[in-house]
Amino acid sequence: MTAYTATVTVRLKQGVLDPEAETTRRALERLGFELESLRSADEFEIDLDADSPANAEDRAGEMAERLLANPTIHDYTVAIEER
């Protein structure tokens, strides 16, 4: 087994209202920053042991599907790094 860190990034799907990002966007604009759009995201770092990077990615993806993200309203990505 090899030690990996899986980074799971969870975002609301395009078109789903994101009040946190909207509030932050307006505040940034009041500070003089020009931006087209802003989306908020949650990031989870998971340390795990697996036989391969693909197996680690599969396990982290299953965690995202079952708990970390709501597939109805969220998209997520998984990145794997060997520790």
Image (cartoon, helix red, strand yellow):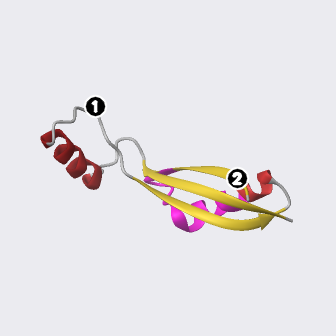
Number of the label disc, if any, that sits on residue 36: 1
Q: Residue at x 66, y 60 (%)?
A: 60
Residue 73 picture location, percent across and down:
43, 53
**Left or right of 34 on screen, residue 65:** right
Q: Which segment is the magenta one? A: 58-75
Q: Secondary structure at mark 1?
A: loop
Q: Main secondary structure of the magenta part?
A: helix
Location of residue 67 with respect to 61 vertically, above or below: below
**Left or right of 9 on screen, residue 58:** right
Residue 12 picture location, percent across and down:
41, 50
Location of residue 36 with respect to 27 vertically, above or below: above
Instruction: Report the Cα–Cα distance between label 2 and label 1.
Output: 32 Å
Graded by Cα atoms within 10 Å as few (under 14), some (14 to 19) or many (20 or more), the crowding at tag 1 reads few
Direction left: furthest residue: 30
CB under 8 Å between discs 2 and 1: no
Number of the label disc, if any, that sits on residue 80: none
Residue 70 picture location, percent across and down:
48, 60
Q: Residue at x 21, y 43 (%)?
A: 28
Q: Which residue is mark 2?
A: 81
Amino acid bearing label 1 = Glu
Graded by Cα atoms within 10 Å as few (under 14), some (14 to 19) or many (20 or more), the crowding at tag 2 reads few
Residue 51 picture location, percent across and down:
86, 60
**Left or right of 33 on screen, residue 74:** right
Q: Residue at x 21, y 36 (%)?
A: 33
Residue 62 sits inside the magenta stretch: yes
Q: Residue at x 83, y 55 (%)?
A: 52
